[in-house]
Image (spheres, grey):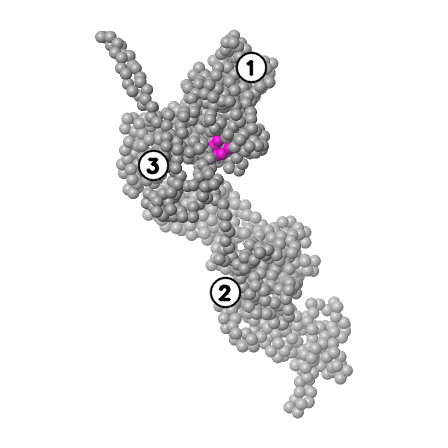
């Protein structure tokens, strides 16, 4: 029984069959669980399409996950033609092995082109034919790579190879538990992992979890699956056997941290592990290590083992640079160099040793300069904190068994170069003056580039520009003036060759350059210190779009300024600047805001302020926008102490709105801000219209000549005979307009007209109250009965409307933005007008057919919204523009269930649009109309929400069979036209009456529609498409309407 924790991945059947096709390549998981994991493939089994990778999956990729494999070939292709390429000599020769894979070529200029292999001859020719021609602008092709991707069948992290007596039927053990007994180092340990896959050909079982590294199946372990019991084949996983030495090695892992290094074929160190326990057996040591071997690189006979005891040398560092550290004096010489070289160094206290710091990680000493005690490391120190004189280090590597092979450090060779550092002064190269007393105080801490260090000097006053290698700059140079960095050496080599005539000795002179050690600069940094400060000519700050000159403040001693200034606001704030002060009276500003939803408990509330003489002051406002959540008018009152303030680079009269309470689920969006704005209506003004004559009876009814009548715009008077006391009482209680005297040519009073007041009902009216009720929709005026409301006195033509406005125009009043630009009647102080947004809400008078439908419902609801049906019919009556409506009770503005709310979804009469939405004006008109006719508990809390519908697009996939090819084009066009019309909300459906809210649609509804097309033989495979999945029914929500989607129509010849 063999086993491994090495992870594997199994591909689907579309992967090419070739042994080790993917070995050595990288695989990346592109989707699903485990996405973005990258592993190296170390083995590929073409028989079961299973790739073994170099590390476990964490987590396991899911079946059907997408993957990508990059097959990169070093070297160059053998030849490239217009639509083919001959692959390199190490490409696989199996025919069609690379077919349908992507190939990317790179030319000598770095340009790339991606193509697809459509045919591969294989063999010695190795010719790949590609889909597209190669770009003629590509230069010589220097390399290529082949890319493959696909879908994973399965992936797993551990398996066990059973003995030859196990079943050869694949899948026979799947889902069963395998009991394994006989572990190392705990023989009594037993585990029962579950088998998730079984390959009968290989007799290999995949288990659901990894083996425990502390308890591994031993050579003589046994396993059982159901009634099958057998002896294990054994294996080595987390231990290694090494020969003991003479005298025997003294190893105590429980006391000392022992490291084993495995070297393969005289290469550099390849594997490192920590020894956990040691068992001596028959002249060998069985070492249990702390981590599993990488699959495919388990220790074998081609490895040499080195045992290292850690922590034998420590000391106080003197200084450290980018890749070096100067050690304490450990009396190292050429004979004891091995005690330092190739050891690992770790900072254990002081600068650089902080937990988590990159400098606390171990580094290997790769060179050591004996005279200067400078150790060169395999990695640079982190720039944040070089080790210093307070850093304590430990050299962790010390030999346990055989010493390392003797190694002579090249730095130990007696190299003593002498450099001259010079600069150009305009006339020639001049040497720097060295030493602390020199003019330039030049100091070279690199020992003439023998070690890492710094070079310090004062910049000469006479340094000047010069040209070096065609570049004019300020240059300094270092020139060798004595000795060198080593010279080439020679060694005699004698070779004895055996011939028939005897031995022949040949002597050759072999050169060696190993003693030449030129300096290598891998990191160069330049620092400077400014010794003489100068003020800048100008100092300007720029904050919040405003420049401020801080030059004088910068030059003045003990005076400071803020380079960065923030606004004083701590909440979301909107600033508005005006060129002149507001005059007395209300100022109206229209905000063309996107309508936003909000949570009632977190409803946003803005507070508006204006800039006074010294600070910001609260502004009296009427905010109909409800804090910018809908398009409406903000009305504010002008203040006398409004003052100019410089903000954002502009001096203006500023106001600001700040969010004081609540929160925005979505930030407000404005398409425009328009001051001096008011709402206008498409209406006709009528003056001095006689409504009729009173007969003194109770509950008299009169009617305006034109209607509907705009609310709060009419003035109604009744002619009465009053005493002087009654006239004075009316004038005292009301204003002068409440009583108007009509005189003849002689100035005599012939009639006294008294203003009456409109009320919603007579329930609070008394006998003497001059009240009336007006139905704005019908224009009817109703007076009281003498008990609840006064009866108008008897008279001829004694009831009149001095002024009122009647709605006219219908749909023609729905003008587009900026179409209104002139005033019919001049208004003092108004130069020009414009409508900043589209007008809406206008509808033509109902037809007779429509009235036949509306009439019975008016008898039912009696102009009061009580039931869901009442709300729907009254919404239609609010505007003829409403063609469809759906009312949902106890649903709030966010579409959530909430008692006391009513939500209506309305559709405007816009047949030219496929998915029309009601304008804000139409929604507001319907909402106000319903609020006047529903319970106060709903209207006063504004719990009526009017919105547009959600359209549910329906997509069809269908095969249509025709009997001749000539009919293909016409039938497809007619099918698309019929489907678009069938799903049109207004006139679609089987009856042509359109679709109602929440109406589902079925496949059977569409079959007859398509089969009725002239030339269609029959229809097959008709489905609704939902995210690529075919369904036979489309479910539509209660707030949704049907709409035509994207249709897939396949026309086939019978």
Q: Nearer the viewer, residue 110 or 169?
A: 110
Rendering coords of residue 505 (x, y %): 27, 12
**How far from the left and from the top, in percent, is residue 350?**
58, 32
Q: Taking 504 as reference, is 581 above or below it?
A: below
Q: Is residue 704 magenta?
A: no
Q: In the picture, residue 869 is in which quadrant?
A: bottom right
Nearer to the camera, 125 or 14 = 125
Q: Secondary structure at mark 2?
A: loop
Height in image: 473 above or below 733? Answer: above
> Which quadrant: the C terminus?
top left
Mark closest to the chain's N terminus, 1 or 3: 3
Q: Which residue is mark 3?
A: 105
* Dots 3, 2 in contact, CB < 8 A: no
The mark closer to the camera, 2 or 1, is 1
Callouts 1 and 3 close, C-beta under 8 Å: no
Where residue 243 appears, as percent x and y from the top left, is: 49, 12
For residue 302, the mark is none
Secondary-structure class at tag 3: strand
Looking at the image, which residue is at 54% across and 30% down?
Answer: 317
Q: Residue at point 54% right, 59% down? A: 552
Tell me the mark number nearer the camera, choosing from 3 and 2.
Answer: 3
Packing grade of label 1 (10 A; few <14, some 14-19, many >=20) is some
- Crowding around mark 2 (Cα neighbors within 10 Å: few <14, some 14 to 19, many 20+) is few
Question: Of label 3 and label 2, which has the lower sequence position?
Answer: 3
Q: In whole angstroms, how far apart are the C-alphas of marks 1 and 3?
A: 56 Å
Q: Range of the magenta residues?
A: 320-324
Q: Which residue is mark 2?
A: 817
**Alpha carbon distance from label 3 to label 2:** 57 Å
Residue visible at 27% across and 36% down in the picture: 81
Select label 1 or label 3 by which is in front.
1
Q: CA distance from mark 2 to mark 1?
A: 92 Å
Disc ID at residue 251: 1
């Amino acid at each position: 029984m063999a086993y491994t924790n090495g992870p594997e991945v199994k591909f689907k059947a579309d992967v090419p069959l070739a042994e080790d096709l993917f070995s050595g390549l990288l695989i990346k998981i592109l989707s699903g669980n485990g996405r973005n994991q990258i592993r190296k493939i170390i083995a590929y089994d073409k028989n079961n399409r299973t790739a073994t990778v170099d590390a476990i999956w964490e987590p396991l990729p899911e079946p059907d996950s997408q993957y990508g494999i990059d097959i990169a070939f070093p070297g160059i292709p053998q030849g490239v033609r217009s639509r083919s390429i001959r692959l390199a000599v190490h490409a696989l020769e199996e025919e069609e092995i690379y077919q349908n894979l992507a190939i990317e070529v790179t030319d000598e200029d770095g340009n790339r082109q991606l193509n697809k292999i459509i045919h591969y001859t294989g063999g010695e020719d190795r010719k790949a034919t590609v889909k597209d021609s190669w770009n003629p602008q590509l230069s010589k092709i220097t390399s290529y790579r082949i890319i493959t991707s696909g879908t994973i069948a399965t992936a797993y992290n551990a398996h066990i190879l059973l003995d030859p007596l196990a079943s050869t039927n694949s899948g026979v053990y799947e889902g069963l538990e395998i009991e394994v007994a006989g572990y190392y180092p705990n023989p009594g340990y037993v585990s029962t992992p579950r088998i998730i896959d079984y390959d009968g050909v290989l007799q290999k079982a995949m288990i659901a979890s990894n083996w425990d590294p502390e308890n591994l199946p031993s050579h003589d372990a046994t396993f059982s699956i159901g009634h099958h019991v057998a002896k294990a084949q054994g294996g080595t996983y987390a231990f290694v056997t090494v020969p003991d030495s003479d005298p025997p090695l003294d190893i105590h892992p429980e006391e000392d941290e022992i490291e084993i290094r495995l070297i393969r074929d005289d290469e550099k160190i390849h594997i490192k592990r920590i020894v956990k326990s040691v068992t001596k057996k028959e002249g060998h040591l069985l070492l249990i290590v702390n981590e599993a071997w990488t699959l495919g690189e388990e220790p074998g006979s081609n490895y040499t083992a080195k045992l290292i005891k850690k922590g034998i040398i420590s000391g106080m560092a003197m200084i450290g640079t980018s890749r070096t550290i100067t050690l304490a004096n450990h009396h190292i010489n050429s004979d004891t160099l091995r005690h330092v070289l190739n050891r690992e160094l770790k900072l254990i206290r002081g600068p650089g040793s902080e937990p988590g710091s990159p400098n606390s990680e171990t580094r290997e000493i790769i060179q050591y300069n004996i005279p200067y005690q400078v150790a060169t490391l395999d990695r640079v120190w982190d720039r944040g904190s070089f080790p210093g004189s307070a850093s304590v280090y430990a050299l962790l590597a010390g030999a346990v068994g055989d010493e390392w092979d003797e190694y002579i450090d090249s730095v130990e060779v007696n190299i003593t170069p002498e450099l001259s550092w010079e600069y150009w002064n305009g006339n020639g190269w001049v040497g720097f003056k060295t030493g602390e007393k020199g003019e330039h105080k030049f100091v070279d801490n690199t020992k003439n580039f023998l070690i890492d260090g710094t070079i310090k000097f004062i910049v000469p006053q006479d340094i000047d520009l010069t040209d070096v290698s065609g570049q004019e700059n300020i240059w300094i140079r270092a020139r060798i003036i004595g000795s060198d960095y080593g010279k080439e050496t020679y060694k005699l080599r004698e070779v004895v060759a055996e011939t028939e005539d005897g031995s022949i000795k040949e002597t050759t002179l072999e050169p060696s350059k190993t003693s030449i050690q030129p300096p290598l600069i891998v990191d160069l940094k330049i620092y400077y210190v400014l010794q003489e400060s100068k003020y800048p000519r100008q100092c300007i700050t720029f904050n919040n779009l405003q420049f401020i000159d801080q030059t004088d403040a910068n030059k003045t001693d003990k005076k400071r300024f803020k380079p960065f200034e923030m606004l004083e606001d701590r909440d979301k704030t909107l600033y508005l600047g005006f060129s002149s002060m507001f005059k007395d009276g209300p100022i109206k500003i229209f905000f063309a805001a996107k309508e936003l939803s909000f949570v009632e408990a977190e409803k946003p509330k803005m507070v508006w302020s204006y800039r006074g003489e010294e600070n910001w002051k609260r502004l009296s406002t009427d905010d109909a926008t409800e804090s910018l959540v809908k398009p409406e008018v903000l009305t504010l009152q002008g203040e006398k102490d409004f003052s100019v303030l410089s903000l954002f680079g502009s001096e203006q009269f500023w106001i600001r709105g700040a969010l004081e309470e609540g929160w925005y689920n979505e930030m407000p969006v404005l398409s425009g801000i328009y001051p001096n704005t008011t709402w206008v209506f498409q209406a006709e003004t009528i003056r001095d219209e006689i409504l009729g004559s009173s007969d003194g009876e109770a509950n008299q009814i009169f009617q305006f000549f034109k209607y509907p009548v705009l609310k709060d715009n009419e003035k109604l008077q009744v002619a009465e005979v009053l005493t002087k006391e009654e006239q004075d009482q009316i004038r005292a209680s009301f204003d002068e307009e409440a009583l108007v005297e009509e005189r003849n040519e002689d100035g005599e009073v012939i009639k006294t007209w008294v203003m009456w007041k409109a009320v919603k009902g007579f329930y609070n009216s008394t006998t003497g109250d001059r009240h009336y009720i007006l139905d704005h929709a019908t224009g009817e005026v109703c007076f009281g009965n003498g008990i609840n409301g006064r009866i108008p006195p008897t008279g001829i033509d004694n009831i009149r409307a001095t002024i009122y406005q009647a709605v006219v125009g219908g749909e023609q009043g729905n003008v587009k933005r900026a179409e209104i630009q002139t005033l019919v009647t001049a208004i003092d102080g108004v130069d020009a007008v414009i409508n900043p947004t589209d007008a809406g809400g206008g509808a033509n008078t109902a037809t007779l057919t429509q009235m036949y439908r509306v009439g019975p419902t008016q008898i039912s609801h009696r102009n009061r919204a009580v039931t869901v049906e009442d709300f729907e019919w009254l919404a239609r009556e609010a505007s003829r523009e409403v063609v469809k409506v759906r009312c949902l009770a106890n649903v709030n503005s966010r579409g959530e269930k909430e008692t006391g709310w009513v939500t209506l979804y309305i559709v405007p009469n816009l047949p030219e649009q496929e998915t029309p939405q009601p304008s804000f004006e139409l929604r507001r008109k319907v909402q106000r109309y319903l609020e006047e006719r529903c319970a106060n508990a709903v209207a006063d809390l504004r719990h009526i929400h009017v919105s547009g519908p959600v359209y549910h697009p329906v997509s069809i996939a269908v095969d249509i069979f025709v009997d001749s090819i000539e009919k293909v084009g016409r039938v497809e066009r007619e099918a698309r036209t019929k489907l678009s019309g069938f799903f049109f909300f207004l006139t679609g459906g089987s009856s042509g009456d359109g679709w109602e809210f929440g109406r589902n649609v079925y496949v059977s509804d569409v079959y007859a529609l398509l089969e009725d097309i002239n030339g269609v033989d029959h229809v097959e495979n008709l489905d609704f498409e939902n995210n690529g999945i075919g369904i036979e029914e489309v479910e539509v929500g209660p707030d949704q309407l049907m709409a035509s989607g994207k249709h897939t129509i396949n026309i086939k010849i019978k």
